Image: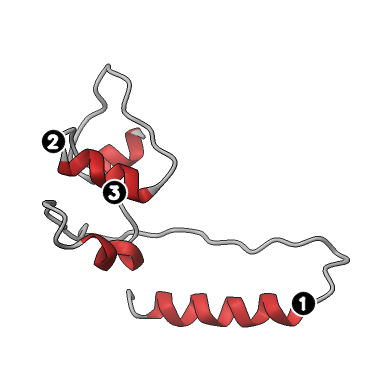
Amino acid sequence: MGQALALCGREAANRRPFQAASLDTLVNLVAAGYGTTRIPGLAAGLFSGRNVVLRPLTGKISRTIRLASRRSFPRPQVLRALEKVIRRAMATFE
């Protein structure tokens, strides 16, 4: 969390942050006035018009994405197709 706060130009507070299992819940907490959160750029369009302000982060931002499967996965071509989709989607952010 400290790394994320540093990216936003903030320091970690000594209180425990809210945690949620879904982006939808996090955005609802923000809309209700419980602070801020980060959401992936790919999901930002889903949350416009929800009484929240969406601001892109600036600077060099990176994320490592890995696909994992068991050796005996019967359809490796599905993973290769998914890899292509992810690479195309991420190329729009470079």
At label 2, which amino acid type do we have? Gly
Mark closer to the chain start, 1 or 3: 3
* Residue occupying the far right of the picture: 72
Give the crowd class for mark 2: few <14, some 14-19, many >=20 residues within 10 Å. Answer: few
Mark 1–mark 3 distance (CA, rounded to whole Å): 32 Å
Give me the disc on residue 52: none
Q: In the rendered image, which residue does mark 2 sit on? A: 33
Residue at 63% from the left image edge and 82% from the top image edge: 81
Quadrant in which residue 20 is drawn: top left
Mark closer to the chain start, 2 or 1: 2
Give the crowd class for mark 1: few <14, some 14-19, many >=20 residues within 10 Å. Answer: few
Residue at 60% from the left image edge and 61% from the top image edge: 66
Q: Quadrant of the C terminus?
A: bottom left
Q: Give the side of residue 37 with respect to residue 62, left or right.
A: left
State if disc 2 and disc 3 touch (CB < 8 Å): no
At label 3, which amino acid type do we have? Arg
> Foreground: 31 or 94?
31
Secondary element type, mark 3: loop
Secondary element type, mark 1: helix
Mark 2–mark 1 distance (CA, rounded to whole Å): 45 Å
The residue mark sitting in front, 3 or 2, is 2
Q: In the rendered image, which residue does mark 1 sit on? A: 76
Residue 51 percent across, percent down from the top left = 11, 52
> Foreground: 7 or 29?
29
Q: In the rendered image, which residue does mark 3 sit on? A: 38
